[in-house]
Amino acid sequence: MNAKPLSSAPPSPWPQGPSRAEQRQAKRDAVLNVAAQMFNERGFHATSLDDVAAHLNVSKPTLYYYVKNKEEILIACMETALALMLDNMEESRRSGRGPLEQLHDCMHVYGQMATQPFGICLIRVGDEVLPPDSRKELRRMKSEINLQFRHLVGDCVQQGLLAPCDPTVTAFVIQGALSWLARWYQPTGAYSADQIIEQCTQLLLQGVLARPAHSQ
Amino acid sequence: MNAKPLSSAPPSPWPQGPSRAEQRQAKRDAVLNVAAQMFNERGFHATSLDDVAAHLNVSKPTLYYYVKNKEEILIACMETALALMLDNMEESRRSGRGPLEQLHDCMHVYGQMATQPFGICLIRVGDEVLPPDSRKELRRMKSEINLQFRHLVGDCVQQGLLAPCDPTVTAFVIQGALSWLARWYQPTGAYSADQIIEQCTQLLLQGVLARPAHSQ
């Protein structure tokens, strides 16, 4: 139990560290992060909780204090990636920017997800291994993201900002091209993640065909 | 042993059926096809050879006459998809068509792969489960396909047919958008596979941004 703070007392010379709950959360996050990177490098099925424990220098019983099993880790990684993406997309929506700017924002949010461990995990590891309830919830979140892309593309077409197209196909083309980053992007390569994401975004928006000189 | 054909004799009224080797091949193909569709629907790990045998109305020992194990099936499915793609890309190269037409051809070849069971398998099932030798060979074939896309994009840029771009990033954007078909395309949907692939191809070539009227 924490002591009741004294309103007029000077601050304690023994600085207060993070609370027990914060420490637990930080340790659970470390477990999720190491596990996600192992899933991404070796595959979900080839990674054991023993591997994760060994990498963190803890015993397997210690690990069980933070997570129930491997599936729970995978669900947490995937949910974190999806929730962060939905939050950021919602933030862009509330910004009051136009639909084309919002589409650009959302493409960046998606690309960032696809170049970070939890998002890579979401894209590379199939959800067939998960219990039906969790799979259903994750698919609901994925559909929501897809729906937002479709709506944004539809709004842009209506306002003449995008060429006439089928918003469903366009949303999948955008998400597919950006999801593929999870398979090929190397953080040690010539470009930063943001540079690559911007290149992909411009390719998708502008296409690759050379334009006649007078339209450039 | 086949009887020596008699040059002047009339054709036999008992039509000759497929040879034993052809029958064996057809049965092996049926095993691969059923297995690929099960991998795609349930996931590789959740599919057992018992499931495949049951679906084909054969015993598991019968199945072992055609395939050694589940990994061998997966390798055969993936190799078939990659070899077919490489063959078709090579055929386009030999046609003598210009690089932009070849790029268009190769995008179609890739899209067709991504909407058929062996290709869906190639894209959805990770290759981490495979023995290192097979994985290496499959990755070599994938690199070859990626290299062909990069070369075609590079040639198009050099000839002023595509806007200046990094051919590596562009090749991955193209392959990613088309690979994603394996995740969302439904054969029972409103468009045929060819129609969807052509829509994706045009979106990638032309981009989604609306063009100023004078450049259309």
Image (tube, coloured by chain):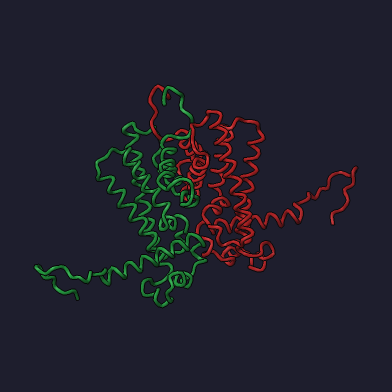
Chain colours: A red, B green
Q: Is residue A13 above or below residue A206?
A: below
* Foreground residue among A48 and A105: A105
Judge whether B24 appears above or below A88 on screen: below
Classify residue B98 as left or right of residue B146: left
Q: Quadrant of the N terminus of chain A?
A: bottom right
Task: Using the image as rendered, state which of residue B164 and residue A188 is in the foreground.
Answer: B164
Percent of width and height locating residue B173: 44, 43
Task: Indicate left or right for B168 with B89 as reference.
Answer: right
* Above or below, B157 relative to B62: above
Residue B161 in view of the camera: yes
Looking at this view, name the residue that lies furthest to the front. B13
Where's residue B181, x and y in %? 46, 49
Q: In the image, what residue occupies the spot 53% across and 57% down?
A: A125
Residue A126 in the image: state x and y as whole percent: 53, 57
Camera-nearest residue between B53 and A92: B53
The furthest residue to the left: B8
Write the residue at 35% across / 59% down: B80
Viewed as shown, does residue A121 lie left or right of B215?
right
Work out whether residue B140 can be spotted: no
Residue A55, quarter of picture: bottom right
Q: Quadrant of the C terminus of chain A?
A: top left
Image location of residue B99, percent across then percent down: 30, 39
Task: Judge whether B206 appears above or below B113 on screen.
Answer: above
Instruction: Report the front residue among B208 and B156.
Output: B208
